[in-house]
Amino acid sequence: MENPSRRKLLMAGGALGALGAVSAATPAYARTPWTWSPKGSVAGAGAGADPRWVWDPEADELVAGLLDRGEVPKVNELLRTWKKNAQPLPDGLPGELRAFMEKARRMPAWTDRGKLATAVEFNEKRGLYLGVLYGLASGMMSTVIPKEARAVYYSKGGADMKDRISKTAKLGYDIGSRNAYDDDGEMIVTCVKVRLVHAAVRHLLPQSPQWDQAADEDIPISQRDMMVTWHSLPTTVMQKLTAWKVPIPDDESAAFLHSWQLGAHMLGIKDEYIPATWAEANSQAEQVLDPVLAPTYEGIKLADVLLNLGSSVDGGLVSPHVLGAMTRYMLGDQIANWLRIPREPVWDSILKVGWKPFVAIREGLLPVPGASDVYWTLEEFLRQAVLLFLSNAKPISVEIPSGNRPG
Ligand code: HEM
């Protein structure tokens, strides 16, 4: 039988085509064939099937069962105590969930501990940029990835974006921490929990009338979507760092990639879709990320919430303006305009003129005497922005939702 999502998509395309609107409204992924070869993946081989039609069957079936049997609140309560990578799973979990999690928490054979140690150096040296990039480049980009924006908006967490952001930031915090994948780290735990959350969302969102009406698919969060979001994270970050001429030794660059390849694997993405090199990552991103970026009602709403996250601290006097200007600078005018981010004459020009010299000064590529106070204002602002996005991250526990955004 034909895949129901494909059917819905084709039906939507047909109806819109009849209205003469198909080229504008057909989702870009429907037009972009999957030609990326699994030879470029960490697996080095694979069937090459379009991940648009691949989800996470084992987790999805399992979590759907937990939800249908009303077991999720109990599971969440038990999992709240499960925090460290090497910690035994709590007693009392349903047997099939325990079996799944024991398997899901295992690191792949291609894990390279040496590279992970180098990734720590990279994360420490580049923590300031990484915080800002995860928050403003990746975070804001997620609002112009239509399928992600809709999934986030109509799921339970969409109603409380501050909480949702801090949970998402937890992953950014965990992957960048010293012991991310070590026994006393938390990245494996976070990934396995997020894998369960995504499986829950695949079961729950199709029951949301609002999502059903807005979305052009039947089941969200395919493996292709996962890779799209993945590219909004490490691939985009590395592209920006390169564009800013931040000097990064090859081994650190490869190590950073490795930590994210592992992240992808632990989130349940198949190895045959995970790029082996930055060149492969860039080519896959060109195929799956760039063409899907577009504004949506939901994304505009989410972006507005994100830009105003700091307003509770400064009453909206400075932070939304600077965050808006940073978004415009990092993602460009088109995306900023899609998100209806107002132009900020002062901050837009400061960033345009001052950002690259600021980076150069920080990196010791320009002599400091030429620097004006603006650079140090920027540095201070960056610290604040990083704090804003990452500070809440630590104590948060990722929980499996048992409902959608209230209608
Ligand atoms: C939940 C990260 C891909 C939609 C989460 C959470 C994290 C996360 C850390 C937990 C936050 C929470 O508990 O609220 C990631 C990463 C991804 C990825 C690192 C890819 C590498 C996606 C994609 C979509 C998506 C592709 C949709 C198309 C969601 C939704 C939730 C969620 C709807 C649940 C929010 C709720 O609780 O209501 N994700 N995600 N994610 N993610 Fe993802």
Image (tube, rainbow, N blue to C red):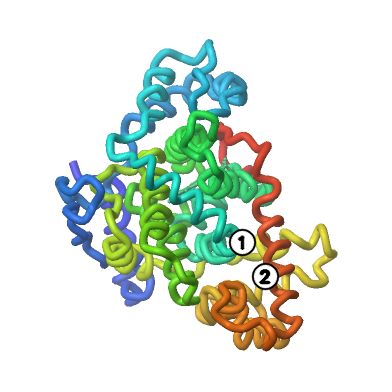
Report the front residue among 45 and 248: 248
**For the point 61% across and 23% down, which residue is it?**
81
Secondary structure under tag 2 reads helix
Q: Image height check: is 381 above or below 67? A: below
**Residue 283 x, y percent position in the rendering:** 28, 66
Task: Judge whether residue 159 can be spotted in this image.
Answer: yes
**For the point 36% across and 39% down, which residue is it?**
268
**Residue 46 x, y percent position in the rendering:** 16, 46
Q: Image height check: is 246 above or below 399? A: below
- Circle on res. 128: 1
**Residue 244 x, y percent position in the rendering:** 50, 76
Report the front residue among 360 and 32: 360
The crowd level at tag 1 (other Cα within 10 Å; few <14, some 14-19, many 20+) is some
- The type of residue carrying mark 1 is Leu
Task: Judge whether residue 225 can be spotted in this image.
Answer: no
- Circle on res. 323: 2
